[in-house]
């Protein structure tokens, strides 16, 4: 596919003020999507932090019942994402079920699942259509992903910049939320205070962040319907 990318992509990139030596970005992708691709990178980085907070929560709750946080880290590397969330839920329900903390952790697990699904859609899809179009400006990143149930069939999604940034922000919020939950749980074992960065703090149980948006793949026609109408050539 990439061999068919028009050579005019470099000329259009220069029109946008991109003067550096051409690399895969300037050779392949529509220069109008630079911020979209940046948002994809931020999404990936934020998700890595969210995953670390899930690991931290497992460490904290495994430390209550087993030989220490090492057990949580050991299992984390050997479990799927769904298994990690199931294990965390089993642990906190058995330890703090029916409490406000348990309710907040339910919200974290639910939000984590959505954030993980959104990230998987974005990171396991490939650019499609106008993303490779060097002859017109586009406002949405078009992606396609093979169906798990029928690999010969592709599903599609078209995302505006504000949607991609919201996904990254949702992940960031839930990462911070997970850390605050772990911090509160650790502090609760020592009278509500904890030493952090050479100072003693008394963390509060964090409020629930807004629910993350939930991406949905669909047939090509549905994805194309999300696109704004082309500008008229008439004066």
Image (cartoon, rainbow, N blue to C red):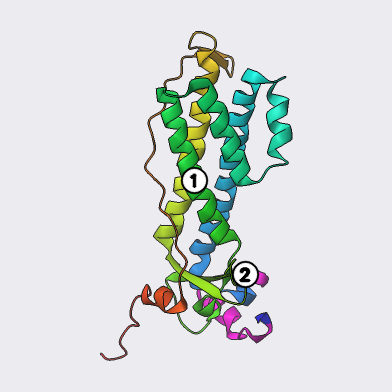
Q: Is residue 30 visible?
A: no
Q: Which residue is mark 1?
A: 171
Report the mark closest to the observer, 1 or 2: 1
According to the picture, the residue beneath numbered tag 2 turns out to be: 25
- Residue drawn at x 38%, y 34% as measured from the top left: 208
In this rendering, position of residue 127 left or right of residue 140: right
Numbered range of the magenta stretch: 3-25
Task: Name the quarter where the C terminus is drawn.
Answer: bottom left
Question: As drawn, which residue projects farthest toward the top?
Answer: 191
Q: Is residue 38 magenta?
A: no
Q: Is residue 20 magenta?
A: yes
**CB atoms of marks 1 and 2 within 8 Å:** no
Looking at the rendered structure, the secondary structure element under dot 1 is helix
Name the image quarter holding the N terminus. bottom right
Q: Residue at x 50, y 79 (%)?
A: 130
Q: Could you tell me which secondary element the residue under label 2 belongs to?
A: helix
Where residue 213 appears, as percent x and y from the top left, is 40, 53
């Amino acid at each position: 596919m990439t061999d068919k990318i028009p050579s005019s992509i470099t000329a259009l990139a220069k029109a946008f003020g991109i003067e550096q030596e051409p690399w895969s970005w300037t050779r392949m992708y529509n220069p109008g999507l630079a911020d979209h691709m940046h948002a994809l990178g931020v999404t990936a980085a934020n998700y890595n932090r969210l995953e670390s907070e899930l690991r931290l929560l497992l460490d904290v709750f495994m430390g209550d019942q087993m030989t220490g946080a090492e057990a949580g880290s050991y299992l984390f590397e050997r479990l799927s994402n769904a298994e990690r969330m199931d294990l965390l839920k089993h642990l906190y329900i058995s330890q703090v079920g029916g409490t406000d903390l348990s309710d907040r952790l339910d919200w974290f697990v639910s939000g984590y699942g959505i954030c993980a699904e959104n990230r998987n859609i974005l990171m396991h899809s490939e650019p499609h259509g106008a993303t490779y179009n060097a002859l017109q400006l586009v406002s949405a990143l078009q992606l396609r992903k093979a169906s798990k149930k029928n690999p010969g069939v592709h599903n599609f999604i078209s995302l505006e910049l504000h949607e991609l940034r919201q996904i990254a922000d949702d992940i960031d919020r839930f990462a911070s939320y997970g850390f605050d939950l772990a911090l509160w749980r650790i502090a609760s074992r020592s009278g509500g205070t904890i030493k952090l960065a050479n100072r003693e703090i008394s963390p509060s149980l964090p409020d629930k962040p807004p629910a993350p948006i939930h991406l949905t793949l669909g047939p090509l026609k549905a994805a194309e319907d999300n696109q704004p109408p082309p500008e008229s050539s008439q004066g």
